[in-house]
Amino acid sequence: MLTKRIIPCLDVRGTRVVKGVRFEGLQDVGDPVELASRYAENGADELCFLDVGATVDGEPTVLDLVRRVSRVLFVPFTVGGGIRSAEDARAALRAGADKVALNSAALSSPRLLQQLAEEFGSQCVVLSVDTREIDGRWRVTTHSATRLDGRECLEWAQEGIHLGAGEILLNVIDTDGGRRGFAVEITKRVAASVDVPVIASGGAGAVEHFVEVFRSTEASAALAASIFHDGSWTPRSLKKHLARHGIEVRP
Amino acid sequence: MIGVIDYGAGNLQSVTNALQHLELPSRSCVTPDDLARVDRLLLPGVGQFGAAVRRLAGNGLDEAILERVQAGVPLLGICLGLQLLFRQSDEAAGLMGLELLPGRTVRIEAKIVPHMGWNRVTLTRPCPLIDEGETSYFYFAHSYVAHLDWPQLLAGTTELDGREIPAIVGRERIWGVQFHPEKSGSAGLALLRRFAEC
């Protein structure tokens, strides 16, 4: 049986992993390669590197990091944040990334999803959707959640999949960084309406939140940062807890 | 010396990195001549069956692979590399694979496709790639799956939505794994080492 995945997320700014609440007030957490290796040794099923500087500052993607990481990491990893063109995506995949996550770039050029799926296969193409609830509607936000896109979350996810995305990374801005639990309602709705894996993201602060999101939604994976960065849980200790609650995980 | 067949597949670097980590000598094979100097062949692959077939044929790698396999060189196909061992795929009607194993590949029937993540592999018969009696979790990421003409080619399965799907297939010196050993942590690295030593 396919297990639920636990994905530590490393927000990278320059050459360091940082953490912050809703992309603001960033603190240094450590070296990305060291952290990634430690998480992989401690049971991470996959890792996600998000270049949190790139889209805002116009910096290049973290290709050097991808190369360094892929030499020591033998679990899959996704790179996102600075993938703005087919060339960026191609370079990241060639450098050793398993998947690329597209957010703003896909919104401004949806055809990019199609192009990458045709070239590398849908399994490489993650559509990253930042969403927040505004007047009862789940809207898509862009540029590190600083701008509102006109689209609705669910419709955009479905369109992205139709174009070629093989996975949805659903990051709920309202709960992100708050450590008070995943946004179960919208995660449930998206996961039930699409036929590709959905990664729940935003709000994990305690193990119960993971139990809740896997019990109440069809999410295939959950992504979290601070719960691992602050050392309160390792992916493995978290998965032991999930297994005790009857959730299938890789031991 | 393991030859990693380089036809532009996305995961070539990951496979090479894993072999380097294991200190197994390897070289990437871009031309048919490169294949003459290796004693094991690794066929990686992610992406689309049709595009891969065209690229392999484009520079004569397909013929060179068949020649080397006939000469007794062991071959391991990974993910799309496994699918390329068969006759054809529903993903690209009309294009022929390497036809080293009888069968074809068909779209996965499951609620969620791609089949993506870690799944447990159970051996159905002894296989040189994994210790007998050992069950391990491996990382999968695929939308198509092998449909075998000969059930006896099956060596390992994994379960998806209550169905068994082929995870390891092969015979004698021709093997394919549907998962990614280069991305399956220590279990995957152990498999690659066994292939190098089989």
Image (spheres, coloured by chain):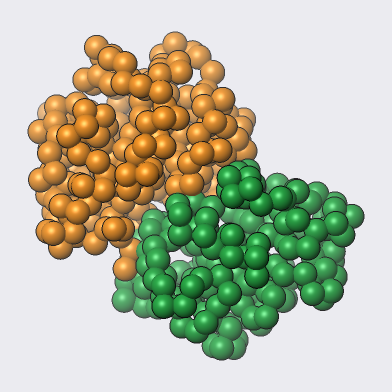
Chain colours: A orange, B green
* Residue most extreme to the right: B33
Q: Establish if B76 lies above or below A146.
A: below
Q: Looking at the image, how many numbered discs can be counted on the residues?
A: 0
**Residue drawn at x 56%, y 25% as measured from the top left:** A64
Q: Position of residue A185 (x, y in %)?
A: 14, 45
Q: Is residue A140 above or below residue B70?
A: above
Residue found 19% across the figure and 54% down from its top: A240
Left/right of residue B60 with respect to residue B73 in the rendered view = right
Q: Is residue B180 visible?
A: no
Task: Looking at the picture, tell me which residue is in the foreground, B16 or B61.
Answer: B16
Residue closer to the observer: A178 or A173: A178
Quadrant containing the N terminus of chain B is bottom right
Q: In the shown orientation, is residue A185 left or right of residue A119? A: left
Q: Relative to A53, is A186 on the left or the right? A: left
Q: Is residue A39 left or right of residue A214?
A: right
- Which residue is painted at 77% across and 69% down in the image? B73
Which residue is more in the foreground, A189 or A126?
A: A126
State the image coordinates of residue A127 (x, y, percent, origin top left): 40, 40
Q: Position of residue B144 (x, y in %)?
A: 52, 66
Place residue B100 in its image quadrant. bottom right
**To which quarter of the image does residue B121 belong?**
bottom left
Q: Quadrant of the C terminus of chain B?
A: bottom right
Occupied quadrant, residue A155: top left
In the rendered image, the vertical position of residue B145 relative to residue A12, given as above or below: below
Whether residue A166 appears in this view of the structure is yes
Give the residue drawn at x 28%, y 21%: A19
Q: Position of residue B196 (x, y in %)?
A: 65, 62
